[in-house]
Image (spheres, rainbow, N blue to C red):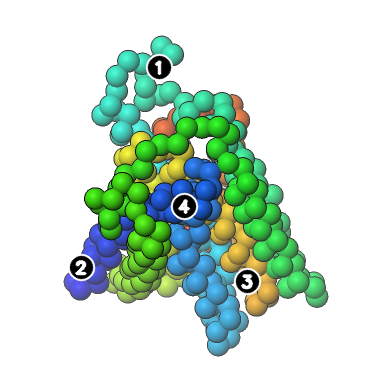
Amino acid sequence: MIHFVLLIVCAVAIYLSCEWFVNAVEWLGQRLDVGKMAVGTILAAFGTALPESVVTLVAVTTGADEEAKNIGVGAAMGGPLALSTIAYGVTGAMLFLKRRRERGPAPAGRDGVRAPLGNEKDMRRLAKDQTWFLPIFVVKVALGLVAFAFKPVLGVLFFAAYAVYFWREIRSGDDGEEDEELEPLKLRPRSAVPETWAVVVQTLATLAVIFFASQLFVRQLDAIGPMLGLSSAVTALLLSPVATELPEVMNAIIWVRQGKTQLALANISGAMMIQATVPSGLGLLFTSWEFDGALLWSGLITMAAIVYLLLTMRAHRLTPGRLAVTALFYAVFGLGLIPILA
């Protein structure tokens, strides 16, 4: 029973910490003078992707044997899978419910629930990160199917790919969009413009809570899995990735609730870029980076979800309902694991 109680406590702690984190990171973006979208794709994504990146780093560098190090490889593959399916799916469901509650005059003669997310410019922005992610991820999966002497050296290229993406996002700006008025910093609610030290303290403190609560959440799932009759392999591949991506999901829920849909989606896509590069680079440098059937299946499902998103974005037909459909890809992944693990 204590594991279930701790699971709920950790989930609540992560949500409340994310409330404070998104509040702080928006002010941090203003202090650093970065574009609004970069707040989601770089600053928020870097913070929320920290827990799973540390899992990969610790596993691949301190694992006693190859099997222990492969936990890091599984984390590097499970992160993008959960983000491209569960995180986007939950965001779509939240947007759908929000539009249903706020349904007013139908835009362009359509039911507001079925209207596309944003204009063509917004769709191009959303598609941009997926276009960056897909080829990198394809190479990442392909390298897991081959073996050659200098494969570890290629890990450096994944770090370089993220450095290019980082630089591009920081310099992109907001294309002349008006700045939104920010909510007061929760640490300094009476200050119209909070001090920089307060912004930094709130950002770092909430990140620390998110990190430790996420790790404790994963441990409770590892303990609960066998109690429910699930094998350790199923728990590691099916449940743990969802737990490690919980901060991104919470951030998305909070930003959707605040009406900041683009920030919610940018946080997920930015975290996906980190997951496609940094943990992969670590895995290539410190492990053999060889995939079994389950890892290959996770890669194929992730690519299928991204192709689906790209097609709907480029056709300007991405609605909350169609975004929510991505969660079904995770269900397909779970069903496909049954014969693979058997």
Check residue 31 in the rendering and tell me which mark sits there, or answer none: 4
Q: Is residue 219 visible?
A: yes
Q: Where residue 200 appears, x then y in whole percent?
A: 40, 62
Report the residue at 58% width, 34% height from top. Answer: 175
Horizontal side of residue 254 vs 341, given as left or right: left
**Cα distance between the residues tagged 1 and 2:** 44 Å
Report the residue at 47% width, 32% height from top. Answer: 178
**Cα distance between the residues tagged 3 and 2:** 34 Å
The residue labelled by disc 1 is: 107
Of badges 4 and 3, nearer the viewer stands 4
Q: Where residue 24 appears, x then y in whole percent?
A: 37, 54
Mark 1 or 2, nearer chain start: 2
Label 3: element kind: helix
Q: Where residue 111 appears, x then y in whole percent?
A: 37, 18
* Residues at circles 1 and 4 in contact by the CB criterion of under 8 Å: no
How crowded pointer 1 is (Cα within 10 Å; few <14, some 14-19, many 20+) is rated as few
Horizontal side of residue 113 vs 45, given as left or right: left
Q: Amino acid at mark 3?
A: Leu
Label 1: element kind: helix
Check residue 282 in the rendering and tell me which mark sits there, or answer none: 3
Q: Where residue 225 appears, x then y in whole percent?
A: 34, 69
**Cα distance between the residues tagged 4 and 3:** 31 Å
Q: Quadrant of the N terminus?
A: bottom left
Closer to the camera in the image, 11 or 36: 36
Mark 1 or 4, nearer chain start: 4
* Residues at circles 1 and 3 in contact by the CB criterion of under 8 Å: no
Mark 4 or 2, nearer chain start: 2
